[in-house]
Image (cartoon, helix red, strand yellow):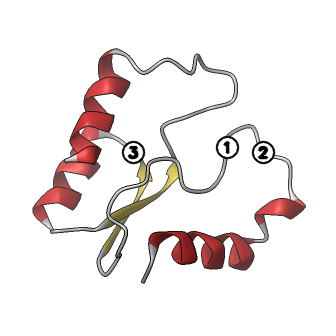
Amino acid sequence: MDNLVLEQRINRLLDVDSMQDYAPNGLQVEGRREVQRIVTGVTACQALLDAAAAAGADAVLVHHGYFWKSESPTVRGMRRQRLKNAAG
């Protein structure tokens, strides 16, 4: 399935536009365009990303993503490393 179609279906299923949230919802890091295998987890931590890579995942679906509305939008340190790993 196309990753943008998958995002639209998840957003519709969860009715994300009907609620206020303290974090941005939706696709935060675009990876492979075609998604066949998804790994899920609570937080986008390094251990989850490593497990997803080992499992051959095309996408990772988490409750706590990379970006938060109250945090700096800069990509440095740990965030930089995780995004680098996510990009492959």
Mark 2, secondary structure of its residue? loop
Q: Position of residue 67 (x, y in %)?
A: 55, 34
Rate crowding at label 1 as few (under 14), some (14 to 19) or many (20 or more) other CA atoms within 10 Å. Answer: some
How far is mark 3 from mark 1, CA to CA?
14 Å
Label 3, on which residue? 44
Which amino acid type is marked by label 2? Asp
Figure quadrant of residue 35: bottom left
| Foreground tag (3 vs 1) | 1
What residue is at 52 percent from the left and 47 percent from the top? 28
Q: Is residue 50 left or right of residue 68?
A: left
Residue depicted at 39% across the width and 45% down the height: 44
Mark 1: which secondary structure? loop
Q: Relative to residue 78, is residue 88 depicted above or below?
A: below
Residue topped by disc 2: 21
Within 10 angstroms of label 3, few (less than 14), some, or many (20 or more) residues?
some
Is the residue under label 1 in contact with that under label 2 (CB below 8 Å)? yes
The residue located at (57%, 69%) in the rendering is: 7
Give, as a three-letter code, the residue at label 3.
Answer: Ala
Q: Are dots 2 and 3 in contact, CB under 8 Å?
A: no
Q: Quadrant of the N terminus?
A: bottom left
Q: Earlier in the sequence, mark 2 or mark 3?
A: 2
Label for residue 11?
none
Image coords of residue 43 (percent x, y): 43, 46
Give the numbered dot on residue 24. Answer: 1
